[in-house]
Image (cartoon, rainbow, N blue to C red):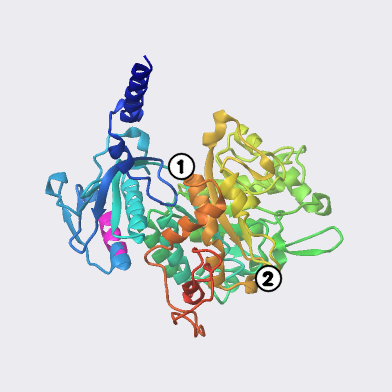
C-alpha cells in the first residue's frame, strides 16, 4: 500500500508539472524555456513568452500593408539608422512577403480593445506589429526600438499593449527661460520614445515672451522662437505622433507685454501698480489679448489652446474697478471675481470659434456670484486652490492631473521643487491629485492624464543640458504610470537598471559639452558602487548618469 501511495503521488506530481495556465499541457522543459517579458518603458500590458529569439540585421526590411503607414515606416527606418547605422529597406507588402528578420507594420487588427494607440506584437523569426490606427503601429515601433537598444536579438513571444490615459507628456516653461529649437526637437523624439504624446509650450510669463510676433514685436523677448521654427517643430511632432499645445498666459504673468503697454497695468485702490496683471476693466485689455489669440491660434494646428489664467488677483477688494466693470456687464449681483471669470469665458469663445478647445489652470476657477466657467473648458489641476478635482468634473469639465507632486521640476536656487520620482513610481497614480484627492470610479475617465512640468522660476540656475538630465528619470516614471501597465519591478531602486538599459532615444545627441575635456576619454576606477554605475559614465557627457 505504501508503494502504491508513493506511485500515486508521483503520478500526481507529474500531472501538475504537465499542466500550465489556461489548460495547455506543456512539459517542464518547455515551460522553463518560455521567454520572460522583455524590458521596456513603459512595460508591456500583456506578454506571452515563446522560445528562441528574433535576430535583427542589415538585411532586415520594413514591410507595410497600407500606404497609411508610409510615414511611420519612414520614421522607423530613420530611427533604426540612428540606432544601428544600417539603411533599412522599406516596401509595400503583406505577411506573405516576409522573410526571416523582416518587420511588418499592419493596420489589420480587429482587436477593438486596443483602441487608437494600442498594438499587438508577434515575434518569431520575424516581427509583426498589428494595430487599428497609425498611432498604435507607431508605438509598436517604439517598443522594437527599445528592445533593439538592448541588443540585436529579441525574445520571441506575443504581446498586447495599450495606454491607460490618452494624454501623457511634458510642459516646458519657455516664457521664463529660452530653450533652443534643437533642445525642443530632441525632446520630441525623447517623448515619443517613451510613448508620451503631448508637448505643452508655456510661451509667455513674467520673464519673457518667447515667440515671434508680427502684430506686436514690441513685447517679444530678444531670445525667442521664430514662427518658422515653431512650424518646423510642429511638423516634427506630428511625425512622432505628438500634439503641440501653446500657452499664452493671461490675464496674469503678463509683465513683458505690459512693460510695452503700461497704461493697461492693474492699479490698486492705494495706487500700487501690479506689473503682471492686466486691467480687465479696460476695453483695450481685451483688444490687446484678442490680437494675441488671433495671431497664434492659426499657427498651431492641434486641437487645444491654453490660455493660462493662473495666479491673477487674490485680494479683489483692492481693485474696486473690477467690481464696477463686472456689475455693469453682468448685473447687480456680480462681484469683482466675475470680471476674471467673464474674461475666461470670453477667451473661450474666441478659442472655440477657431475650432479648438480651451485649457486653463485650476487655481482661480471659482468664487463668482454671477458667472461660472463654461464646462467645455478643460481644467488643468495643479494645486489645492478652490474647487476639488471632483467638483470640477461634477460641473461638467474634463480635467488633467498636473499636480505639483510629483510632476513639478522647478529651477530654483536650492534643491526644492524636484519631482519625488520614488513616490511617483511606487505609490502615485495619475488618478491621485494634489492633496491625495481622487475622482469617483465612475468619473475617472474624465481625467485625461498627466505631464512633467519644467518651471524656470530661476532660469539661470541650470543649463539646458542639466535640465534635460534632471527630468530624464521623471519622464520615465510618468511614462510608466500614465501608460498604466503592470510595473516591471516594485521599487524605484530596482527600476533604475531598466532605465539604464533603455537609455535615450536613438537620435539623442551625444556630442560633448563645450569645454568637457574628459568626454569619451579612457577611464579607470578603483571600485564602483554598483554595476549600474560604471566608470565610463563619468566621461559620457550625460549629466543624468553617474
Name the side, left or right, on which 514 lies relative to 30.
Answer: right
Depth check: give the residue in front, 501 or 42. 501
Please state, as top left, top right, bottom left or bottom right, where the N terminus lies in the image.
Answer: top left
The residue that label 1 is drawn on is 485
Residues in magenta, as a range: 70-79
Residue 72 at x, y = what percent?
Answer: 29, 54
Name the side, left or right, on which 485 lies relative to 287.
Answer: left
Residue 53 at x, y = what percent?
Answer: 26, 51
Residue 531 at x, y = what percent?
Answer: 49, 64
First reached walking from the N terminus: tag 2 or tag 1: 2
Depth check: give the residue in front, 240 or 360. 240
Residue drawn at point x = 49 percent, y = 63 percent: 532
> Residue 42 got which mark?
none
Residue drawn at point x = 55 percent, y = 28 percent: 442
Residue drawn at point x = 52 percent, y = 61 percent: 472
Q: Bin the neighbour count of mark 1 within 10 Å (Cα to Cα): few under 14, some 14-19, many 20 and up.
A: some
The residue that label 2 is drawn on is 259
The number of callouts visible is: 2
Amino acid at each position: 500500500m505504501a508503494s502504491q501511495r508513493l506511485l500515486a503521488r508521483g503520478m500526481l506530481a507529474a500531472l501538475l508539472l504537465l499542466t500550465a495556465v489556461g489548460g495547455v499541457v506543456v512539459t517542464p522543459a518547455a515551460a522553463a524555456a518560455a521567454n520572460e517579458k522583455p524590458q521596456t518603458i513603459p512595460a508591456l500590458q500583456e506578454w506571452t513568452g515563446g522560445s528562441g529569439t528574433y535576430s535583427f540585421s542589415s538585411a532586415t526590411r520594413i514591410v507595410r500593408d497600407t500606404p497609411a503607414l508610409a510615414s511611420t515606416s519612414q520614421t522607423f527606418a530613420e530611427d533604426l539608422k540612428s540606432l544601428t547605422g544600417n539603411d533599412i529597406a522599406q516596401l509595400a507588402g503583406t505577411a506573405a512577403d516576409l522573410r526571416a528578420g523582416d518587420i511588418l507594420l499592419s493596420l489589420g487588427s480587429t482587436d477593438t480593445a486596443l483602441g487608437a494607440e494600442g498594438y499587438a506584437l508577434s515575434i518569431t523569426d520575424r516581427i509583426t506589429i498589428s494595430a487599428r490606427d497609425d498611432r498604435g503601429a507607431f508605438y509598436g515601433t517604439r517598443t522594437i526600438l527599445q528592445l533593439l537598444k538592448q541588443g540585436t536579438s529579441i525574445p520571441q513571444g506575443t504581446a498586447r499593449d495599450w495606454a491607460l490615459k490618452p494624454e501623457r507628456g511634458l510642459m516646458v516653461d519657455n516664457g521664463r527661460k529660452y530653450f533652443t529649437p534643437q533642445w525642443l526637437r530632441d525632446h520630441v523624439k525623447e517623448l515619443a520614445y517613451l510613448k508620451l504624446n503631448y508637448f505643452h509650450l508655456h510661451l509667455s510669463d513674467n520673464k519673457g515672451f518667447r515667440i515671434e510676433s508680427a502684430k506686436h514685436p514690441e513685447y517679444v523677448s530678444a531670445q525667442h522662437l521664430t514662427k518658422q521654427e515653431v512650424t518646423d517643430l510642429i511638423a516634427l511632432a506630428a511625425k512622432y505622433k505628438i500634439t503641440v499645445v501653446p500657452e499664452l498666459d493671461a490675464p496674469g504673468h503678463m509683465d513683458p507685454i505690459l512693460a510695452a503697454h503700461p497704461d493697461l497695468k492693474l492699479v490698486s485702490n492705494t495706487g500700487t501698480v501690479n506689473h503682471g496683471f492686466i486691467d480687465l476693466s479696460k476695453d483695450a485689455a481685451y483688444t490687446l489679448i484678442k490680437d494675441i489669440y488671433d495671431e497664434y491660434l492659426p499657427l498651431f494646428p492641434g486641437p487645444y489652446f491654453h490660455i493660462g489664467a493662473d495666479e491673477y488677483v487674490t485680494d479683489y477688494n483692492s481693485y474696486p474697478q473690477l467690481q464696477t466693470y463686472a456689475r455693469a456687464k453682468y448685473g447687480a449681483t456680480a462681484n469683482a471675481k466675475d470680471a476674471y471669470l467673464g474674461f475666461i469665458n470670453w477667451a473661450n469663445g474666441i478659442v472655440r470659434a477657431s475650432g479648438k478647445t480651451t485649457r486653463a489652470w485650476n487655481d482661480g476657477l471659482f468664487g463668482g456670484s454671477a458667472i461660472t466657467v463654461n464646462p467645455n473648458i478643460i481644467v488643468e489641476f495643479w494645486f489645492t486652490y478652490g474647487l476639488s478635482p471632483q467638483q470640477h468634473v461634477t460641473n461638467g469639465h474634463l480635467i488633467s492631473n498636473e499636480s505639483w507632486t510629483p510632476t513639478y521640476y522647478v529651477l530654483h536656487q536650492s534643491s526644492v521643487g524636484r519631482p519625488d520620482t520614488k513616490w511617483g513610481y511606487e505609490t502615485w497614480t495619475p488618478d491621485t491629485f494634489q492633496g491625495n484627492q481622487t475622482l469617483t470610479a465612475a468619473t475617472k475617465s474624465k481625467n485625461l492624464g498627466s505631464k512633467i512640468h519644467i518651471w524656470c522660476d530661476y532660469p539661470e540656475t541650470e543649463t539646458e543640458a542639466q535640465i534635460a538630465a534632471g527630468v530624464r528619470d521623471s519622464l520615465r516614471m510618468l511614462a510608466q504610470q500614465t501608460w498604466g501597465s503592470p510595473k516591471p519591478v516594485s521599487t524605484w531602486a530596482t527600476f533604475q537598471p531598466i532605465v539604464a538599459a533603455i537609455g535615450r532615444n536613438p537620435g539623442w545627441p551625444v556630442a560633448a559639452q563645450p569645454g568637457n575635456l574628459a568626454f569619451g576619454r579612457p577611464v579607470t576606477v578603483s571600485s564602483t558602487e554598483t554595476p549600474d554605475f560604471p566608470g565610463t559614465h563619468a566621461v559620457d557627457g550625460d549629466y543624468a548618469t553617474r
